[in-house]
Amino acid sequence: MIKKISLLGSTGSIGCNVLKIVRRFPGRFQVVGLAAGSNITLLRDQVEAFNPQIISVADEEPARQLSKSLGRQWRGKIAWGRQGNIEVATHQEADTVVSAIVGGAGLIPTYAAIEAGKNIALANKETLVMAGDLVMKAVKRHKVELLPIDSEHNAVFQALAAGRRDDVNKIILTASGGPFRQQKLADLWQITPEQALAHPNWSMGRKISIDSATMINKGLEIIEAKWLFDIPVEDIEVLIHPQSIVHSMVEFRDGSVIAQMGIPDMQTAIAYALSYPERLKTVLPRLNLGRCGDLQFSTPDFANFPGLKLAYQVCKKGGTLPAIFNAANEIAVEAFLAEKIRFPEISLVVAETVSRLMSREPTDIKMILEADLAGRVQAESIVTAFAMKKSLKWGKEIACPEIPPAAGVDLAPTGEK
Protein backbone atom coordinates (compact mmCIF):
# COMPACT_ATOMS: atom_id res chain seq x y z
CA MET A 1 0.00 0.00 0.00
CA ILE A 2 1.37 3.39 -1.03
CA LYS A 3 1.61 5.94 1.76
CA LYS A 4 0.31 9.33 0.59
CA ILE A 5 2.22 12.24 2.08
CA SER A 6 1.63 15.94 2.58
CA LEU A 7 4.96 17.59 3.34
CA LEU A 8 5.03 20.84 5.34
CA GLY A 9 8.35 22.64 4.90
CA SER A 10 9.34 20.97 1.65
CA THR A 11 12.20 23.34 0.72
CA GLY A 12 13.96 23.16 4.10
CA SER A 13 16.71 20.75 5.10
CA ILE A 14 14.34 18.12 6.50
CA GLY A 15 11.89 18.52 3.65
CA CYS A 16 14.56 17.98 1.02
CA ASN A 17 15.74 14.85 2.82
CA VAL A 18 12.16 13.55 3.00
CA LEU A 19 11.90 13.90 -0.77
CA LYS A 20 15.17 12.01 -1.22
CA ILE A 21 13.56 9.08 0.60
CA VAL A 22 10.38 9.37 -1.49
CA ARG A 23 12.41 9.46 -4.69
CA ARG A 24 14.38 6.40 -3.57
CA PHE A 25 11.19 4.40 -2.87
CA PRO A 26 8.58 5.47 -5.46
CA GLY A 27 6.54 2.33 -4.91
CA ARG A 28 6.15 3.08 -1.20
CA PHE A 29 5.36 6.79 -1.09
CA GLN A 30 3.44 9.38 -3.07
CA VAL A 31 3.55 13.13 -2.47
CA VAL A 32 0.08 14.71 -2.64
CA GLY A 33 0.84 18.07 -1.00
CA LEU A 34 3.81 20.40 -0.59
CA ALA A 35 4.00 23.51 1.60
CA ALA A 36 7.00 25.83 1.46
CA GLY A 37 8.00 29.38 2.29
CA SER A 38 9.36 31.75 -0.34
CA ASN A 39 11.83 29.54 -2.22
CA ILE A 40 9.59 29.21 -5.25
CA THR A 41 12.44 28.14 -7.53
CA LEU A 42 13.11 24.99 -5.53
CA LEU A 43 9.39 24.40 -4.95
CA ARG A 44 8.75 24.58 -8.69
CA ASP A 45 11.38 21.88 -9.23
CA GLN A 46 9.72 19.75 -6.54
CA VAL A 47 6.31 20.19 -8.12
CA GLU A 48 7.66 19.12 -11.50
CA ALA A 49 9.34 16.09 -9.94
CA PHE A 50 6.51 14.85 -7.68
CA ASN A 51 3.33 16.31 -9.23
CA PRO A 52 1.42 17.02 -5.98
CA GLN A 53 -2.27 17.85 -6.01
CA ILE A 54 -1.88 20.97 -3.84
CA ILE A 55 0.96 23.31 -2.91
CA SER A 56 1.25 26.31 -0.62
CA VAL A 57 3.70 29.20 -0.26
CA ALA A 58 4.13 32.00 2.27
CA ASP A 59 2.29 34.83 0.51
CA GLU A 60 -0.05 35.57 -2.39
CA GLU A 61 2.56 37.21 -4.63
CA PRO A 62 4.94 34.21 -4.65
CA ALA A 63 1.86 32.07 -5.34
CA ARG A 64 1.10 34.16 -8.42
CA GLN A 65 4.71 33.91 -9.61
CA LEU A 66 4.72 30.15 -9.10
CA SER A 67 1.42 29.71 -10.92
CA LYS A 68 2.78 31.63 -13.90
CA SER A 69 6.03 29.68 -13.82
CA LEU A 70 4.34 26.27 -13.73
CA GLY A 71 1.95 27.11 -16.55
CA ARG A 72 -0.97 24.98 -17.64
CA GLN A 73 0.87 21.68 -17.57
CA TRP A 74 0.30 21.42 -13.81
CA ARG A 75 -3.36 21.37 -12.79
CA GLY A 76 -3.11 21.29 -9.02
CA LYS A 77 -4.16 23.96 -6.54
CA ILE A 78 -1.91 26.76 -5.26
CA ALA A 79 -2.66 28.24 -1.84
CA TRP A 80 -0.73 30.55 0.48
CA GLY A 81 -0.25 31.67 4.06
CA ARG A 82 -1.40 29.88 7.19
CA GLN A 83 -4.62 28.77 5.54
CA GLY A 84 -2.63 27.34 2.66
CA ASN A 85 -0.53 25.28 5.06
CA ILE A 86 -3.72 24.02 6.70
CA GLU A 87 -5.17 23.02 3.33
CA VAL A 88 -2.04 21.04 2.50
CA ALA A 89 -2.01 19.42 5.95
CA THR A 90 -5.65 18.38 5.79
CA HIS A 91 -5.83 17.39 2.11
CA GLN A 92 -8.27 14.52 1.73
CA GLU A 93 -5.82 12.31 -0.18
CA ALA A 94 -3.07 12.52 2.47
CA ASP A 95 -2.86 9.84 5.13
CA THR A 96 0.47 11.01 6.58
CA VAL A 97 1.66 14.57 7.19
CA VAL A 98 5.36 15.27 7.57
CA SER A 99 5.59 18.36 9.77
CA ALA A 100 8.93 20.00 8.96
CA ILE A 101 8.11 23.73 9.03
CA VAL A 102 10.65 25.54 11.20
CA GLY A 103 9.41 27.31 14.32
CA GLY A 104 6.05 28.09 15.85
CA ALA A 105 4.45 28.42 12.41
CA GLY A 106 4.29 24.62 12.29
CA LEU A 107 1.86 24.29 15.21
CA ILE A 108 -1.46 25.22 13.56
CA PRO A 109 -1.19 23.09 10.39
CA THR A 110 0.12 20.13 12.40
CA TYR A 111 -2.73 20.40 14.90
CA ALA A 112 -5.21 20.74 12.02
CA ALA A 113 -3.79 17.57 10.45
CA ILE A 114 -4.30 15.66 13.71
CA GLU A 115 -7.86 16.93 13.98
CA ALA A 116 -8.39 15.71 10.41
CA GLY A 117 -7.24 12.23 11.40
CA LYS A 118 -3.84 12.26 9.70
CA ASN A 119 -0.83 10.37 11.00
CA ILE A 120 2.09 12.68 11.81
CA ALA A 121 5.81 12.32 11.17
CA LEU A 122 7.06 15.14 13.39
CA ALA A 123 10.18 17.20 12.79
CA ASN A 124 8.64 20.44 14.06
CA LYS A 125 9.53 20.22 17.75
CA GLU A 126 7.77 23.52 18.46
CA THR A 127 4.40 21.79 18.05
CA LEU A 128 4.96 19.88 21.30
CA VAL A 129 6.99 22.62 22.98
CA MET A 130 4.16 25.11 22.60
CA ALA A 131 1.11 22.89 23.04
CA GLY A 132 2.27 19.45 24.15
CA ASP A 133 -0.68 18.63 26.38
CA LEU A 134 -3.30 19.73 23.84
CA VAL A 135 -1.54 18.02 20.94
CA MET A 136 -1.06 14.67 22.68
CA LYS A 137 -4.69 14.68 23.85
CA ALA A 138 -5.75 15.28 20.24
CA VAL A 139 -3.52 12.40 19.09
CA LYS A 140 -5.27 10.06 21.53
CA ARG A 141 -8.71 11.44 20.73
CA HIS A 142 -8.34 10.86 17.01
CA LYS A 143 -6.31 7.64 17.40
CA VAL A 144 -3.55 8.74 15.04
CA GLU A 145 0.16 7.97 15.11
CA LEU A 146 2.73 10.63 15.95
CA LEU A 147 6.26 9.45 15.17
CA PRO A 148 9.38 11.58 15.72
CA ILE A 149 11.76 12.51 12.91
CA ASP A 150 14.30 14.46 15.00
CA SER A 151 17.33 12.17 15.30
CA GLU A 152 17.35 12.31 19.11
CA HIS A 153 13.69 11.52 19.63
CA ASN A 154 13.68 8.96 16.86
CA ALA A 155 16.62 7.30 18.64
CA VAL A 156 14.72 7.25 21.94
CA PHE A 157 11.67 5.83 20.17
CA GLN A 158 13.81 3.00 18.82
CA ALA A 159 15.61 2.35 22.13
CA LEU A 160 12.32 2.17 24.04
CA ALA A 161 11.46 -0.97 22.08
CA ALA A 162 14.07 -2.82 24.18
CA GLY A 163 11.88 -2.86 27.30
CA ARG A 164 8.63 -1.93 29.01
CA ARG A 165 7.76 1.72 29.48
CA ASP A 166 7.22 1.06 33.19
CA ASP A 167 10.85 -0.04 33.45
CA VAL A 168 12.34 3.17 32.03
CA ASN A 169 14.57 4.98 34.51
CA LYS A 170 15.55 7.95 32.36
CA ILE A 171 16.03 9.24 28.83
CA ILE A 172 19.43 10.55 27.78
CA LEU A 173 19.44 13.04 24.92
CA THR A 174 22.81 13.56 23.29
CA ALA A 175 23.99 16.88 21.89
CA SER A 176 27.00 17.70 19.75
CA GLY A 177 27.52 20.84 21.82
CA GLY A 178 27.67 22.92 18.67
CA PRO A 179 30.72 24.84 17.50
CA PHE A 180 31.40 26.60 20.83
CA ARG A 181 31.33 23.83 23.42
CA GLN A 182 35.01 24.43 24.30
CA GLN A 183 34.89 28.22 24.19
CA LYS A 184 35.41 30.31 27.29
CA LEU A 185 32.38 32.27 28.43
CA ALA A 186 34.06 35.63 27.80
CA ASP A 187 34.88 34.66 24.21
CA LEU A 188 31.24 33.99 23.36
CA TRP A 189 30.60 37.74 23.23
CA GLN A 190 32.72 37.94 20.08
CA ILE A 191 30.90 35.23 18.13
CA THR A 192 29.56 36.30 14.74
CA PRO A 193 26.52 34.84 12.98
CA GLU A 194 28.76 33.24 10.36
CA GLN A 195 30.70 31.38 13.06
CA ALA A 196 27.53 30.26 14.82
CA LEU A 197 26.07 28.89 11.60
CA ALA A 198 29.05 26.57 11.04
CA HIS A 199 27.81 23.39 12.75
CA PRO A 200 30.59 20.77 13.00
CA ASN A 201 28.47 17.67 12.21
CA TRP A 202 25.00 18.37 10.87
CA SER A 203 23.71 20.22 7.81
CA MET A 204 20.78 22.28 9.09
CA GLY A 205 18.86 25.46 8.41
CA ARG A 206 19.96 28.83 9.79
CA LYS A 207 17.57 28.98 12.74
CA ILE A 208 18.24 25.44 13.96
CA SER A 209 22.00 25.94 13.54
CA ILE A 210 21.90 28.93 15.90
CA ASP A 211 19.70 27.01 18.34
CA SER A 212 22.28 24.24 18.33
CA ALA A 213 25.07 26.72 19.02
CA THR A 214 23.22 28.16 22.04
CA MET A 215 21.99 24.66 23.01
CA ILE A 216 18.48 26.09 23.25
CA ASN A 217 17.65 23.53 20.58
CA LYS A 218 18.41 20.84 23.13
CA GLY A 219 16.22 22.68 25.62
CA LEU A 220 13.34 22.58 23.14
CA GLU A 221 14.00 18.85 22.70
CA ILE A 222 13.75 18.31 26.46
CA ILE A 223 10.28 19.84 26.48
CA GLU A 224 9.30 17.85 23.39
CA ALA A 225 10.54 14.60 24.94
CA LYS A 226 8.47 15.16 28.08
CA TRP A 227 5.27 15.12 26.04
CA LEU A 228 6.27 12.67 23.35
CA PHE A 229 7.34 9.95 25.78
CA ASP A 230 5.16 10.94 28.77
CA ILE A 231 8.12 11.19 31.14
CA PRO A 232 8.88 13.68 33.94
CA VAL A 233 11.41 16.32 32.96
CA GLU A 234 13.50 15.29 35.97
CA ASP A 235 14.09 11.97 34.19
CA ILE A 236 15.48 13.57 31.04
CA GLU A 237 19.26 14.03 30.94
CA VAL A 238 21.45 15.76 28.37
CA LEU A 239 25.00 14.68 27.54
CA ILE A 240 27.45 16.37 25.21
CA HIS A 241 28.62 13.90 22.58
CA PRO A 242 30.78 15.73 20.00
CA GLN A 243 30.97 12.84 17.52
CA SER A 244 27.16 12.67 16.97
CA ILE A 245 27.31 8.87 16.62
CA VAL A 246 25.12 7.95 19.59
CA HIS A 247 21.90 9.79 18.84
CA SER A 248 20.30 9.17 22.24
CA MET A 249 19.89 6.52 24.93
CA VAL A 250 17.36 5.01 27.30
CA GLU A 251 18.34 3.76 30.76
CA PHE A 252 16.15 1.05 32.30
CA ARG A 253 15.75 0.43 36.01
CA ASP A 254 18.00 -2.66 35.95
CA GLY A 255 20.91 -0.46 34.85
CA SER A 256 20.79 -1.42 31.17
CA VAL A 257 21.42 1.49 28.79
CA ILE A 258 20.18 1.06 25.23
CA ALA A 259 21.73 3.38 22.66
CA GLN A 260 20.75 4.03 19.05
CA MET A 261 23.79 4.73 16.89
CA GLY A 262 24.44 5.71 13.29
CA ILE A 263 26.11 8.21 11.03
CA PRO A 264 24.94 11.82 11.45
CA ASP A 265 22.44 11.88 8.58
CA MET A 266 18.76 12.74 9.00
CA GLN A 267 17.67 10.34 6.27
CA THR A 268 17.99 7.40 8.68
CA ALA A 269 15.47 8.83 11.15
CA ILE A 270 13.18 10.07 8.37
CA ALA A 271 13.11 6.68 6.64
CA TYR A 272 12.24 4.89 9.90
CA ALA A 273 9.47 7.34 10.79
CA LEU A 274 7.93 7.01 7.33
CA SER A 275 8.19 3.20 7.08
CA TYR A 276 7.58 2.18 10.73
CA PRO A 277 7.39 -0.59 11.81
CA GLU A 278 9.40 -1.71 8.77
CA ARG A 279 12.93 -0.58 7.97
CA LEU A 280 13.90 0.57 4.50
CA LYS A 281 17.18 -0.43 2.91
CA THR A 282 18.90 2.92 2.46
CA VAL A 283 22.02 3.64 0.41
CA LEU A 284 23.62 5.70 3.17
CA PRO A 285 27.18 4.90 4.33
CA ARG A 286 27.27 2.39 7.17
CA LEU A 287 28.64 3.21 10.60
CA ASN A 288 32.19 1.88 10.99
CA LEU A 289 32.98 1.92 14.70
CA GLY A 290 36.55 0.79 14.04
CA ARG A 291 37.22 4.09 12.30
CA CYS A 292 35.28 6.31 14.70
CA GLY A 293 37.95 6.48 17.39
CA ASP A 294 36.94 7.43 20.91
CA LEU A 295 33.32 8.30 21.65
CA GLN A 296 33.25 11.06 24.25
CA PHE A 297 30.51 12.14 26.64
CA SER A 298 30.35 15.00 29.13
CA THR A 299 27.77 17.02 31.03
CA PRO A 300 26.80 20.41 29.57
CA ASP A 301 28.12 23.65 31.05
CA PHE A 302 25.09 25.67 32.13
CA ALA A 303 27.27 28.75 32.62
CA ASN A 304 28.11 28.87 28.91
CA PHE A 305 24.67 27.70 27.80
CA PRO A 306 22.14 29.15 30.27
CA GLY A 307 19.29 28.70 27.81
CA LEU A 308 19.49 24.96 28.39
CA LYS A 309 19.06 25.37 32.15
CA LEU A 310 16.22 27.80 31.56
CA ALA A 311 14.47 25.20 29.37
CA TYR A 312 14.42 22.74 32.28
CA GLN A 313 12.86 25.39 34.52
CA VAL A 314 10.31 26.41 31.90
CA CYS A 315 9.36 22.78 31.35
CA LYS A 316 8.80 22.26 35.08
CA LYS A 317 6.60 25.36 35.35
CA GLY A 318 4.63 24.41 32.26
CA GLY A 319 1.44 26.19 31.23
CA THR A 320 1.96 28.72 28.45
CA LEU A 321 5.54 29.41 29.54
CA PRO A 322 7.11 27.00 26.98
CA ALA A 323 5.24 28.81 24.20
CA ILE A 324 6.61 32.12 25.48
CA PHE A 325 10.10 30.61 25.75
CA ASN A 326 9.96 29.42 22.15
CA ALA A 327 8.58 32.71 20.82
CA ALA A 328 11.26 34.75 22.55
CA ASN A 329 13.96 32.49 21.19
CA GLU A 330 12.72 32.86 17.62
CA ILE A 331 12.81 36.65 17.94
CA ALA A 332 16.25 36.58 19.58
CA VAL A 333 17.72 34.32 16.90
CA GLU A 334 16.41 36.60 14.15
CA ALA A 335 17.93 39.58 15.95
CA PHE A 336 21.31 37.85 16.29
CA LEU A 337 21.36 36.89 12.61
CA ALA A 338 20.58 40.52 11.79
CA GLU A 339 23.49 41.57 14.07
CA LYS A 340 21.21 43.53 16.41
CA ILE A 341 22.33 41.56 19.47
CA ARG A 342 25.33 39.40 20.34
CA PHE A 343 25.47 35.66 20.85
CA PRO A 344 25.05 35.47 24.67
CA GLU A 345 22.23 38.01 24.46
CA ILE A 346 20.04 35.40 22.77
CA SER A 347 19.68 33.66 26.13
CA LEU A 348 19.38 37.01 27.90
CA VAL A 349 16.45 38.03 25.70
CA VAL A 350 14.72 34.69 26.23
CA ALA A 351 15.20 34.69 30.00
CA GLU A 352 14.08 38.28 30.43
CA THR A 353 10.98 37.66 28.32
CA VAL A 354 10.06 34.59 30.35
CA SER A 355 10.50 36.52 33.59
CA ARG A 356 8.16 39.33 32.53
CA LEU A 357 5.15 37.32 31.35
CA MET A 358 2.69 35.33 33.42
CA SER A 359 2.03 31.70 32.60
CA ARG A 360 -1.52 30.38 32.26
CA GLU A 361 -2.88 26.87 31.96
CA PRO A 362 -3.97 26.58 28.32
CA THR A 363 -7.36 25.10 27.55
CA ASP A 364 -7.26 25.59 23.79
CA ILE A 365 -4.92 26.50 20.93
CA LYS A 366 -6.12 30.11 21.00
CA MET A 367 -4.49 30.59 24.40
CA ILE A 368 -1.25 29.15 23.04
CA LEU A 369 -1.29 31.61 20.14
CA GLU A 370 -1.97 34.50 22.52
CA ALA A 371 1.04 33.49 24.63
CA ASP A 372 3.16 33.15 21.51
CA LEU A 373 2.23 36.67 20.37
CA ALA A 374 2.84 38.13 23.83
CA GLY A 375 6.27 36.48 23.93
CA ARG A 376 7.20 37.89 20.54
CA VAL A 377 6.09 41.42 21.40
CA GLN A 378 7.94 41.37 24.71
CA ALA A 379 11.09 39.91 23.16
CA GLU A 380 11.06 42.54 20.40
CA SER A 381 10.99 45.30 22.99
CA ILE A 382 13.93 43.77 24.85
CA VAL A 383 15.92 43.39 21.62
CA THR A 384 15.24 47.06 20.87
CA ALA A 385 16.47 48.05 24.34
CA PHE A 386 19.65 46.05 23.83
CA ALA A 387 20.30 47.60 20.43
CA MET A 388 19.87 51.13 21.78
CA LYS A 389 22.48 50.58 24.50
CA LYS A 390 25.38 49.61 22.29
CA SER A 391 27.01 49.91 18.91
CA LEU A 392 26.18 47.16 16.42
CA LYS A 393 29.90 46.48 15.90
CA TRP A 394 31.43 43.28 17.21
CA GLY A 395 34.33 43.88 19.57
CA LYS A 396 35.69 43.72 23.11
CA GLU A 397 35.23 47.43 23.62
CA ILE A 398 31.45 47.05 23.74
CA ALA A 399 29.99 46.95 27.22
CA CYS A 400 27.34 44.33 27.87
CA PRO A 401 23.85 45.51 28.88
CA GLU A 402 23.03 45.40 32.56
CA ILE A 403 20.05 43.07 32.64
CA PRO A 404 19.14 41.43 35.97
CA PRO A 405 19.13 37.62 36.19
CA ALA A 406 15.75 36.34 35.08
CA ALA A 407 13.63 33.24 35.70
CA GLY A 408 15.98 32.05 38.41
CA VAL A 409 18.93 31.63 36.05
CA ASP A 410 22.25 33.40 36.58
CA LEU A 411 22.53 34.94 33.13
CA ALA A 412 24.84 37.82 33.94
CA PRO A 413 27.92 37.61 31.67
CA THR A 414 31.30 37.36 33.36
CA GLY A 415 34.88 37.83 32.34
CA GLU A 416 36.37 40.17 29.77
CA LYS A 417 33.88 41.53 27.25
Image (cartoon, rainbow, N blue to C red):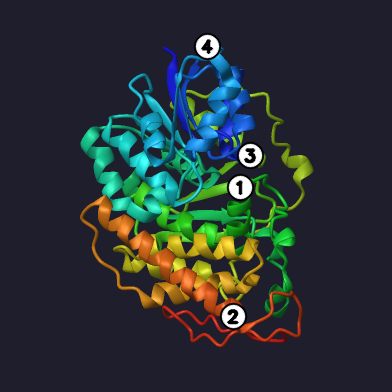
What residue is rendered at 56% in x and 34% in y?
A: 15
Dot 3: what SS? loop
Question: In which quadrant will I find the C terminus?
Answer: bottom right
Question: In which quadrant will I find the N terminus?
Answer: top left
C-alpha separation, residue under disc 1 versus residue under disc 3: 7 Å
Q: Which of the two discs, 3 and 2, sits closer to the camera?
A: 2
Q: Which residue is mark 2?
A: 388
Could you say which quadrant of the image residue 406 lies in?
bottom left
**Which tag, 3 or 2, sits closer to the chain's start?**
3
**Which tag, 1 or 4, sits closer to the chain's start?**
4
In this orientation, which residue lies closer to the viewer: 38 or 5?
Answer: 38
Residue 213 position within the rendered picture, expressed as x and y whole percent measured from the top left: 63, 61
What residue is rendered at 60% in x and 25% in y?
A: 44
C-alpha separation, residue under disc 2 versus residue under disc 4: 57 Å
Q: Which of the two discs, 3 and 4, sits closer to the camera?
A: 4
Residue 337 position within the rendered picture, expressed as x and y whole percent measured from the top left: 64, 61
Q: Which mark is residue 262?
A: 3
Amino acid type assigned to the residue bearing label 4 in the image: Gly
C-alpha separation, residue under disc 3 versus residue under disc 4: 26 Å
The crowding category of the residue bearing disc 2, from other C-alpha atoms within 10 Å (few below 14, some 14 to 19, many at least 20), is few
Q: Which mark is residue 246?
A: 1
Q: Which of the two discs, 2 and 4, sits closer to the camera?
A: 2
Dot 4: what SS? loop
What residue is rendered at 48% in x and 17% in y?
A: 30
**Which tag, 3 or 4, sits closer to the chain's start?**
4
Q: Which mark is residue 27?
A: 4
Residue 295 position within the rendered picture, expressed as x and y whole percent measured from the top left: 69, 53
